[in-house]
Image (cartoon, rainbow, N blue to C red):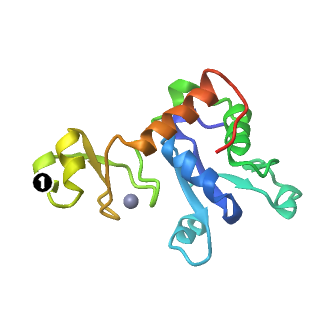
Amino acid sequence: MLKNLDMCFIVEKPLGKLLKWLRILGFDTICDSDDSNDKRFIDSGKEKRIRLSRSVATRDRKNTNQILFIVSNNPFEQLKQVIHTLNIGFGDIRPFSRCNRCNTLLKPVDKDSIRGMIPDYVWVTHTNFRFCRCCQKIYWPGNHTKEGKEIIKRLFIFNLNGKF
Ligand SMILES: [Zn+2]
């Protein structure tokens, strides 16, 4: 098995929330969809992505080395299954380091350079911003981060059951 830091995933379509949360935790995660450029990566065979699937047909394939069949319909339970099955620890994650829309690693961006690109009250009240060079989305610590931290606590510290 790969070292946790190098772990990366390909997620089948019905698992959209799981895909988003794996990206929020910092894991390189792409969607298996025919209408996306992601397909090229898969066909190249260069990447050893772990496939996360809800499909029984995928589960029953003979070569299941890199496939994890996701049991639950609940996104939080799905995330818990991935974390526990692959023995991912708190030290293995890099929360909020990746664009949850397109999977690109985020870069810190100078506050002055993004004035006018975000609401004024956000610009005034925050100092740390990160930027996705691919889809141009700007990130800052906000409600989304709060929600993410709560999920991370529940996953790694309190180990409580919960729902998104
Ligand atoms: Zn992006």
Q: Nearer the viewer, residue 158 or 5?
A: 158
In the rendered view, tell whether residue 96 sits above or below residue 62: above
Quadrant in the picture for the C terminus: top right
Visible residue check, residue 49: no
Q: Is residue 137 left or right of residue 89?
A: left
Visible residue check, residue 1: yes
Q: Residue furthest bottom?
A: 35
Q: Residue at x 55, y 59 (%)?
A: 30
Q: Residue furthest front?
A: 121
Residue 68, position as x, y percentages in the image: 76, 48
Quadrant in the picture for the N terminus: top right
In the rendered view, tell whether residue 73 sits above or below residue 3: below
Q: Residue furthest top?
A: 157
Q: Residue at x 20, y 38 (%)?
A: 127
Q: Is residue 117 left or right of residue 140?
A: left
Q: Residue at x 69, y 42 (%)?
A: 163
Image quadrant where residue 13 sits = bottom right
- Asked whether mark 1 lies closer than 8 Å to ligand 1, one says no
What amino acid is labelled 1 in the image? Ser
SS for tag 1?
helix
The residue where tag 1 is placed is 113
Image quadrant where residue 84 sits = top right
Residue 33, position as x, y percentages in the image: 62, 71
In the image, ligand 1 is in what quadrant?
bottom left
Q: Residue at x 86, y 64 (%)?
A: 57
Residue 23, position as x, y percentages in the image: 51, 48
Image quadrant where residue 82 sits = top right
Q: Nearer the viewer, residue 120 or 109?
A: 120
Q: Nearer the viewer, residue 129 or 164?
A: 164
Within 10 Å of disc 1 (Cα), the crowding (few <14, some 14-19, many 20+) is few
